[in-house]
């Protein structure tokens, strides 16, 4: 499993490094609204335990708050704080997992309805006995439904799916389906 973790971290770091040349290109400018350099969103949805984690826990609730800084019209640095609650199977306690992640994020057609990809690394803190805080990785994809021409580009309804992996003893992996509202300024 260590090689799987290394591969995930390598992919996440490579995605963030791809943003460096994009940072040097230019700032995105909208003639009507100027620069929208910052995005923030609040998201909620469903967390689905996978792999060995699925043996002891059922699906649960997930929530996160994101803050993004746009380097140009396609690339952002995305930081988020997430929380999820995985319900215990027949015995035991539910597991709450808190994480803080830093990602690179790519918007295919910014300022419009658009697909996006993100990937990064994070710190994961489970509240379950026997599992320590660990670093892991995440990657995801989604779609932003823009508010329209009369609003600041990048604001709208956001839907996405994220995969998280942490190399705990029993392997910690889960998938989240999230819906949220994104604001741009």
Image: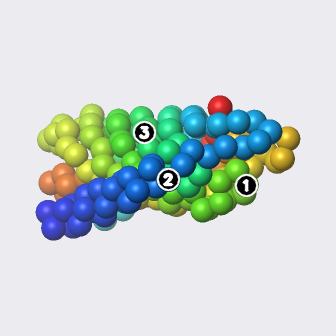
In this rendered view, identify the residue nearer to me: 33 or 103: 33
Which residue is identified by label 3? 79
Q: Are marks 1 and 3 in contact (CB under 8 Å)?
A: no
Is residue 5 visible to us here?
A: yes
Q: CA distance from mark 2 to mark 3?
A: 22 Å
| Viewer-nearest residue: 158 or 53 | 158
Query: From what the image shows, is residue 58 above or below residue 94?
Result: below
Mark 1 or 3, closer to the camera: 1
Indicate the position of residue 159 as horizontal and vertical percent values. Answer: 62, 53
Identity of the residue drawn at 33% across and 56% down: 17
Give the residue at mark 2.
25
Q: Is residue 183 above or below residue 48?
A: above
N-terminal of the pair, mark 2 or mark 3, is 2
Q: Which of the 4 quarters of the picture holds residue 80?
A: top left
Q: CA distance from mark 2 to mark 1?
A: 20 Å
Give the image quarter of residue 34: top right
- Judged left or right of residue 159, residue 177 is left
**Residue appearing at x 67%, y 43% in the figure:** 29
For label 1, the residue is: 112
- Secondary structure found at label 2: helix
Instruction: Give the answer, above or below, for where 100 lies relative to 58.
Output: above
Horizontal placement of 84 versus 114: left or right? left
Q: CA distance from mark 1 to mark 3?
A: 22 Å
Q: Quadrant of the C terminus?
A: top right
- Where does the image place residue 168, in percent across and percent down from the top left? 18, 52
Q: Kindly give the residue lying farthest to the front in the view shown.
A: 25
Q: Secondary structure at mark 1?
A: loop
Direction right: furthest residue: 150
Name the spot of residue 146 as percent of width and height, x first.
Answer: 74, 49
């Amino acid at each position: 499993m260590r090689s799987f973790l290394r591969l995930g971290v390598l992919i996440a770091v490579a995605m963030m490094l791809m943003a460096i040349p994009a940072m040097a290109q230019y700032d995105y400018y909208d003639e009507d609204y100027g620069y929208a350099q910052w995005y923030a969103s609040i998201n909620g949805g469903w967390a689905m335990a996978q792999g060995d984690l699925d043996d002891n826990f059922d699906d649960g609730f997930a929530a996160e708050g994101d803050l993004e800084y746009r380097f140009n019209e396609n690339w952002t640095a995305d930081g988020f704080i997430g929380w999820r609650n995985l319900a215990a199977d027949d015995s035991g306690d539910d597991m709450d997992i808190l994480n803080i992640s830093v990602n690179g994020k790519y918007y295919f057609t910014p300022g419009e309805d658009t697909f996006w990809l993100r990937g990064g690394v994070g710190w994961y803190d489970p509240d379950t006995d026997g599992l320590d805080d660990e670093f892991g990785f995440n990657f995801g994809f989604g779609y932003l439904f823009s508010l329209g021409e009369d609003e600041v580009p990048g604001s709208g309804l956001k839907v996405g799916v994220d995969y998280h992996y942490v190399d705990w003893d029993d392997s910690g992996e889960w998938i989240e389906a999230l819906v949220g509202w994104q604001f741009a300024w």
